[in-house]
């Protein structure tokens, strides 16, 4: 039962808000989020290009800098058929973690007609719940997961229609399970982890009207040390969380200067 409660606490934010895709936010910048999270098959902004498909960096001329943040305010509720006395099953509670700030910053610079470089830092994943002071429901559990990537990237313009790119994903994660064991021992506390991955991309632009793009992103393995006691033996265990590999394809059209239509499949 404790493992079921753990899953409920970690995944409580997933699926309860259309602002997320699994534990990832739909888009990086307001431009991408406003278009359903696209950015692989057509350019929607220099910052999103670094994260979604760095090959689109060649679409932007000169020097570009943007920064901002997301105020994410989910309402997460838990319900369980198991409840400690005197609570009658089923029991439910609402998480007190209701506000998360997710930062973003990106720089894209055109070196010459062929080469463009960029670097971005994004909070791309995270969630958490806080059931403390909830009449012992869910063992007073609170959790917090934060995951961000720093991405240096380079793009090369093969010709007027095709660009290719490569990027390194430097990942940082922080996890606090905040649980207590059946014996009342304190949780393992906050654990930090680092990982690395890579991304390849290609972009196609036909006359600034028809667009297409393809990317592959490798998995990023993260290990958080001594964060949870799943079987109640008083020994805190490591937790391996892998950000999965991803392949994405997208297409788009721009019939007018101020009108775009696109779709991505990831």
Image (tube, grey):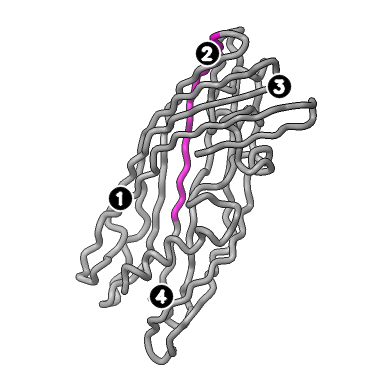
Task: Name the residue: 52% across, 13% down.
Answer: 156
- How far separated are the C-alphas under marks 2 and 4? 52 Å
Residue closest to the eye, 147 or 21 = 21
Q: Which residue is mark 2?
A: 156
Q: Position of residue 3 (x, y in %)?
A: 31, 68
- What range is drawn magenta here? 145-158
Disc 2 + disc 4, Cβ < 8 Å: no
Disc 4 + disc 1, Cβ < 8 Å: no
In the image, residue 123 above or below residue 16:
above
Give the position of the N terminus as an image quadrant. Answer: bottom left
Label 2 neighbour load within 10 Å: few <14, some 14-19, many 20+: many
Label 3 neighbour load within 10 Å: few <14, some 14-19, many 20+: some
Mark in front: 2 vs 4: 2
| Mark number, residue 240 | 1
| SS category of the residue bearing label 3 | loop
Which of pointers 4 and 1 lies earlier in the amino acid sequence? 4
Q: Which residue is mark 3?
A: 209
Q: State yes or no: residue 193 in magenta.
A: no
Mark in front: 3 vs 1: 3
Residue 35 location, quadrant: top right
Label 1 neighbour load within 10 Å: few <14, some 14-19, many 20+: few
Q: Which residue is mark 4?
A: 138
Label 4 neighbour load within 10 Å: few <14, some 14-19, many 20+: many
Disc 2 + disc 1, Cβ < 8 Å: no
Mark in front: 2 vs 1: 2
| SS category of the residue bearing label 1 | strand
Mark in front: 2 vs 3: 3
Residue 17 location, quadrant: bottom right
Task: Name the residue: 25% across, 59% down.
Answer: 237
In the image, residue 28 above or below residue 23:
above
Residue 67 location, quadrant: top right
Which of pointers 2 and 1 lies earlier in the amino acid sequence? 2
């Amino acid at each position: 039962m404790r493992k079921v409660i753990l899953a409920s606490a970690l995944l409580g934010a997933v699926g309860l808000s259309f602002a997320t895709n699994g534990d990832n936010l739909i888009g990086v910048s307001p431009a991408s989020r406003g278009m359903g999270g696209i950015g692989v098959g057509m350019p929607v902004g220099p910052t999103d290009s670094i994260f979604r498909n760095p090959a689109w960096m060649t679409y932007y001329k000169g020097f570009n800098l943007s920064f901002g943040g997301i105020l994410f305010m989910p309402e997460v509720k838990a319900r369980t058929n198991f409840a400690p006395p005197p609570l009658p099953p089923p029991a439910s509670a609402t998480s007190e973690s209701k506000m998360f700030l997710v930062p973003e910053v990106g720089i894209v610079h055109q070196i010459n007609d062929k080469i463009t470089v960029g670097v971005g830092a994004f909070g791309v994943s995270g969630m958490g719940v806080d059931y403390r002071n909830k009449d012992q429901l869910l063992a007073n559990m609170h959790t917090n997961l934060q995951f961000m990537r720093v991405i240096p990237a380079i793009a090369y313009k093969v010709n007027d229609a095709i660009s290719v790119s490569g990027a390194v994903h430097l990942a940082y994660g922080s996890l606090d399970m905040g649980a207590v064991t059946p014996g009342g021992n304190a949780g393992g506390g906050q654990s930090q982890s680092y990982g690395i991955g890579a991304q390849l991309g290609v972009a196609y632009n036909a006359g600034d009207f028809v667009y297409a793009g393809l990317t592959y992103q490798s998995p990023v393995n993260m290990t958080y040390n001594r964060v949870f006691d799943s079987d109640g033996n008083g020994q805190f265990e490591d937790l391996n969380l892998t950000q999965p590999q991803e392949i994405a394809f997208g297409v788009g059209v721009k019939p007018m200067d101020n009108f775009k239509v696109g779709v991505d499949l990831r």
